[in-house]
Image (tube, rainbow, N blue to C red):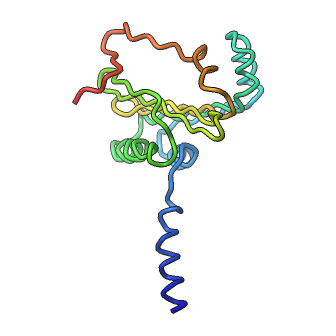
Amino acid sequence: MKTIALFLALCLSVPLLYADDATAIMNDFKKEKKADYVNLPRFLVKMGMKSAGQKELAKRISAIRMLDLEECSLTVKEDYAKRLSALPSQGYEVLMRMKDGEDKVFFLIKEQQNWVVELLIGSCGDSNNLVLFSGEFKLEELAGMIQIDNSAEGCSTEEKN
């Protein structure tokens, strides 16, 4: 009986081991051949955001990480797209989806106790990029940082099938 209970507990815990988040995706794909990865430390983030007029938000963002898979193989890009599309089921909320030419762009947030702890901007298609803002900030504070321009040709907030 103990063996059966242990087996069931193991079976139920295995999916938790494979739960994905943005950090896991970044860590896995930054090692791929031809992948570009940049991790901006806190002092550079603060310096850059203060010079952009975002002094208050600069205090709340602890890191910015960027991943570019544009030069990677098609297999890597497909695996990346599959894992990125699964993030909403892993505790991320879709803030916005856009289509820009052949690229699908996703804005995702992860919240804890009414604070945004991660803002994730990812794209799949021609360019396969991921930008992760980590820290603790309110969604309203992001309005000054993200300026949406829907007037650009080929850019739409509605996804077309």
Taking the view exactly as shown, the residue that stands out farthest to the left is 161
The residue at the point 39 percent across, 29 percent down is: 127
Residue at the image point whose x is 72% and y is 32% from the top:
62
Task: Count all numbered tags in the image, as a single digit.
Answer: 0
Q: Horizontal placement of 104 versus 88: left or right?
A: left
Quadrant of the rendered structure where residue 45 is? Answer: top right
From the top left corner, tell me how far across and down residue 102 is, in percent: 30, 26
Placement of 153 over or under 156, stated as above or below: above
**Residue 57 image offset from top left, x and y in percent:** 70, 21
Q: Residue furthest bottom?
A: 1
Q: Quadrant of the C terminus?
A: top left
Q: Residue at x 35, y 44 (%)?
A: 78
Q: Is residue 150 above or below residue 61?
A: above
Q: Residue furthest top?
A: 151
Q: Choose top left, top right, bottom left or bottom right for residue 72.
A: top left
Q: Nearer the viewer, residue 64 or 34?
A: 64
Q: Nearer the viewer, residue 91 or 20?
A: 91
Q: Find residue 85 and report its horizontal and vertical position in percent.
A: 39, 42
Above or below, 89 relative to 159: below
Q: Return the x and y of residue 122 as percentages of the image width and height.
A: 46, 32
Residue 159 is left or right of residue 136, and the answer is left
Judge left or right: residue 40 versus residue 130.
Answer: right
